[in-house]
């Protein structure tokens, strides 16, 4: 940072000047950048995702190209749920920019983020009939509620026939969301202590 000193009419002015530069390499650990009391760090500490692989093992083939880790997809959807991002496209865009979100998902800066269409392909393809993916997501949200990380009053998981995993913030503008079903499955909001 450069400092400029100017004397104008007997007044001493010190103004720092920041010149923008981009380093080719950055030397820091993402782990060190996420505060201990950050919501995603608390979720990572208290919520167990191991059951996801066990319950989905029959839904994946042992041959062919490796899929995207279903736990990663659920972690990304949970971020969208917690922060009120209902567009998968927007969620993926935001994931590119947030250090804490990268840390929570385990995605390094050199790793590819799943394409936004991956979510709808899973929803309308592999898990359309069984609703298993939605049930797993609800189990994760339930775990968050049980340990007091979220509570039931602002967000709801809604089931709409064409988009069963659609997430919605209660009280939002009516024209920006599908209609609320008569009985919503769960409600949750971020607990702020």
Image (tube, grey):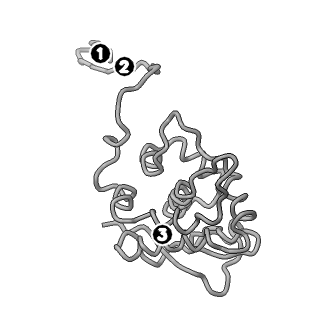
Cα separation, mark 3 vs mark 2, equals 47 Å
Residue 188 in picture, x, y percent from top left: 48, 74
Q: Are marks 2 and 1 in contact (CB under 8 Å)?
A: yes
The kind of secondary structure element at disc 3 is helix
**Front residue of 133 and 187:** 133
SS assignment at label 1: strand
- Whole-angstrom CA distance, mark 1 to mark 3, is 51 Å
Write down the quadrant of residue 185 in the picture.
Answer: bottom right
Neighbor class of circle 2 (other Cα within 10 Å; few <14, some 14-19, many 20+) is few
Residue 109 vs residue 160, the one in the foreground: 109
| x, y percent for residue 72 | 53, 54
Residue 59 as seen in the image, left or right of residue 104? right
Residue at the disc numbered 2: 17
Q: Along the horizontal axis of the image, is 140 left or right of 126?
A: left
2 or 1: tag closer to the N-terminus: 1
Lower sequence index among marks 3 and 2: 2
Question: Going 71% across and 72% down the picture, which residue do you hit?
Answer: 178
Assess disc 3: are there few (<14), some (14-19) or many (≥20) residues with their C-alpha within 10 Å of its C-alpha. many
Looking at the image, the residue that sits furthest to the bottom is 182
Quadrant (top left/top right/bottom left/bottom right) for the C terminus: bottom left
Residue wearing tag 1 = 3
- Dot placed on the residue nearer the N-terminal end, 1 or 3: 1
Label 1, residues with CA under 10 Å away: few <14, some 14-19, many ≥20: few
As measured in the structure, the alpha-carbon distance from the residue carrying label 2 to the one carrying label 1 is 6 Å
Q: Are marks 1 and 3 in contact (CB under 8 Å)?
A: no
Q: Quadrant of the N terminus?
A: top left
Residue 123: x %, y % from top left: 70, 64
Above or below, 30 against 72 in this view is: above
Query: In the figure, residue 77 lies in which quadrant?
Result: bottom right
Residue under numbered circle 3? 140
- Image mark for residue 128: none
């Amino acid at each position: 940072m450069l400092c400029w000193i100017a004397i104008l009419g007997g007044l001493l002015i010190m103004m720092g000047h920041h010149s923008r530069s981009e380093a080719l390499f950055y030397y820091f650990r993402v782990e060190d950048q996420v505060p201990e009391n950050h919501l995603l760090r608390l979720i990572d500490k208290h919520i167990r995702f191991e059951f996801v692989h066990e319950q989905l093992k029959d839904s994946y083939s042992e041959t062919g190209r490796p899929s995207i880790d279903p736990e990663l997809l659920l972690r990304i959807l949970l971020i969208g749920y917690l922060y009120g991002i209902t567009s998968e496209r927007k969620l993926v865009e935001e994931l590119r920019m947030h250090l804490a979100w990268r840390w929570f998902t385990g995605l390094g800066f050199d790793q590819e983020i799943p394409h936004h269409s991956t979510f709808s392909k899973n929803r309308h393809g592999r898990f359309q009939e069984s609703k298993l993916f939605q049930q797993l997501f609800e189990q994760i949200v339930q775990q968050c509620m049980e340990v007091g990380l979220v509570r039931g009053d602002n967000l709801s998981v809604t089931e709409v026939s064409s988009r069963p995993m659609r997430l919605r913030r209660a009280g939002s503008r009516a024209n920006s969301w599908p209609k609320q079903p008569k009985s919503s499955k769960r409600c949750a909001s971020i607990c702020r202590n």
